[in-house]
Image: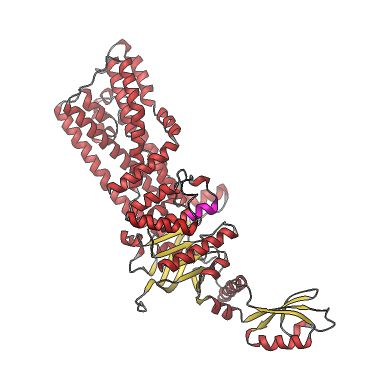
Amino acid sequence: MLIKYAVLLRRSFSAMLEYRAMIFIWMLTNVMPLVMLAVWFSLSEGGPIAGYSQNDFVAYYLLITFVRQMTNVWVIWEIDYEIRHGDFSIKLLHPLNPIHEYIASHITDKFLRLAVMIPLGIFAWIIFPTIHYDLTFTTVTLFLIALVASWLIRFLSQYCFGLLAFWISASTTLNEIWFATSLMLGGIVAPLDLFPANIQLIAKYLPFRYMFAFPVEIVSGRLAQTELINGLAAMLGWLIVSVVVYRWLWRRGLKHFSAFGA
Amino acid sequence: MPLAMANTIIQVDHLCKYYQVHQKEPGLIGSLKSFVARKYSDVKAVDDVSFAIDAGEVVGFLGPNGAGKTTTLKVLSGLLYPTRGVARVLDFTPHERRAAFLRNITLVMGQKQQLNWDLPAMDTFLVNAAIYEIPDEQFKKTLAELTELLELTPLLKKQVRKLSLGERMKCELSAALLHRPQVLFLDEPTIGLDVTMQTKIRQFIADYNARYGATIILTSHYMADVTALCKRVIVIDHGKLLYDGDLHALAEKIAPHKLIRVEFSQPLNGQRLAEYGEVVKERGQRAELLIPRDQTSQVAARMLAELPIADVTIEEPPIEDVITRVFEQAARARAERGESDENDNDE
């Protein structure tokens, strides 16, 4: 399996390098967190909002921009296209689950994004020398684990919406609704601390926080230990749910596809 | 179910594949209607088809568009599962899509491609080598053979999108055959190619069959592909099997005539050609006649004796005409049974 991944990664690297300019432009379109930063930055000029000073907003939004870039997922557009155009059938002829090809191309994309993000991060640190994160060995380790888990939840949930294309033609629309909700309740529009208490409570049980905000919260130094543990448990829970739903949809979807459309 | 022979590779028994297709009248009103109440009809893409193919056979699969050829190939390669009936390939049930099965077959669709558009074909080859777990040695050997048979050397390092249609097809075939499948399903492998390239691909398929003893089912709209490669043909139309057997026996069965072409040394004066057989063409001092198979030699002898003949040839009628006749006969038979040509039942 490792060899297969090595080869798949090599190919998607070559393919993406053909489109390096396009990837850079795609990255620039994901600047919504920075726009929100500008909004909250100016609103908090008069004093902290819900405990967030200007400096806190900068720290929060720079890191959530990073999380969003590093967990970026587009697999639904490929699945949707390939199912409707019959290219998916070709993939089904291979003795390898097609999900591995998509995972490989997403991993490649992360390396390319990282290459852009690291210099930008250093640049940001120079401009905002006052921003501060709670960086210990534990928080950084947990941040990295949570980052991978966020990506997996985002990837698998979008993959599941993609598989709906076996049955319906509106799968991408459903995914858009899901995505808009995740911007709202995932902490992109505003840090979840700024929401009313009851919405905060709901958000802790929904998957969206674990797609964006939670890794940032881990290094923000705002989580009490129980909150941290509960959050990690909820994240693991949603990860397991994603895997289970994916496996179920995949089996059912293939059956449906081979009955009607392949 | 008939007992499978020891070397039967493909066994199809009473195979049926029906689709439910939703019907929509054109235009906005039609769209609204179909939004409120969808009308479905059953399309019998494959309807009670049985055949068996032995190891090493190259079988031509003939039928007009929509006859059920591609559907059958998709069932056999595991992309579709049958509505009824049984399909077995290499002792596997295709739609279970076991890795051991997929590693031994290939499906090439002339209209579809698996090569990555932006990369040279070699990149896809390397990926396939990994996916199919082809040992290094075997990969090198197979690639060398394919390179020799298909003259791939100048193509391997070019971006696929910069290849011509024929060059791309060569690379597609190679990508599909790197794992040396024992069973090949080739759906229109020469579609859109010029005559030279068609001949090359055809030659390659024959070579592959000879070299590896592979079992091949081939569909094509070019009869030349079929006559060059296949001793045996399976003819289907409207999902039903019309003929299964020797290609030349089909000609004898369907077209019980031979074609006599004659050239006269001087214009005929009054002699009537219709006395000898069915006149297909008569222009100037040339004519073509259809003569019943068993009388060909007597009629030819009579014509030579009685007419001012400069030249004469006796031929099989073109295979295209034979096939057209098969389908015409089938259509007539359906009409007599009172079946509609669309082969669907509204619900």
Q: Which residue is at the front of the view, B213 or B287?
A: B213
What residue lies at 42% left-to-right and 36% top-to-bottom?
A17
Q: Residue furthest top?
A: A46
Q: Is residue B295 above or below residue A231?
A: below
Which stretch appears magenta? Answer: B164-170
The verdict on residue B168 being magenta is: yes
- Residue A239 at x, y percent in the picture: 24, 41
Q: Which residue is at the front of the view, B96 or B165?
A: B165
- Residue A214 at x, y percent in the picture: 25, 30
Q: Specify whether B112 is left or right of A157.
A: right
The image shows a total of numbered marks equal to: 0
Q: Specify whether B28 is left or right of A190.
A: right
Residue A26 image-quadrant placement: top left
- Residue A83 at x, y percent in the picture: 42, 50
The answer to whether residue A99 is seen in the rendering is yes
The verdict on residue B64 being magenta is: no
The answer to whether residue B18 is seen in the rendering is no
Report the predominant secondary structure element of the magenta stretch: helix
What residue lies at 45% left-to-right and 64% top-to-bottom?
B208
- Residue B187 at x, y percent in the picture: 49, 61
Q: Residue furthest right?
A: B269
Q: Which residue is at the front of the view, A78 or B217?
A: B217
Location of the N terminus of chain B by quadrant is bottom left
Q: Is residue A172 above or below residue B196?
A: above
What residue lies at 63% left-to-right and 87% top-to-bottom?
B294
What residue lies at 70% left-to-right and 87% top-to-bottom?
B299
Q: Specify whether B92 is left or right of B176.
A: left
Q: Is residue B207 above or below residue B252?
A: above
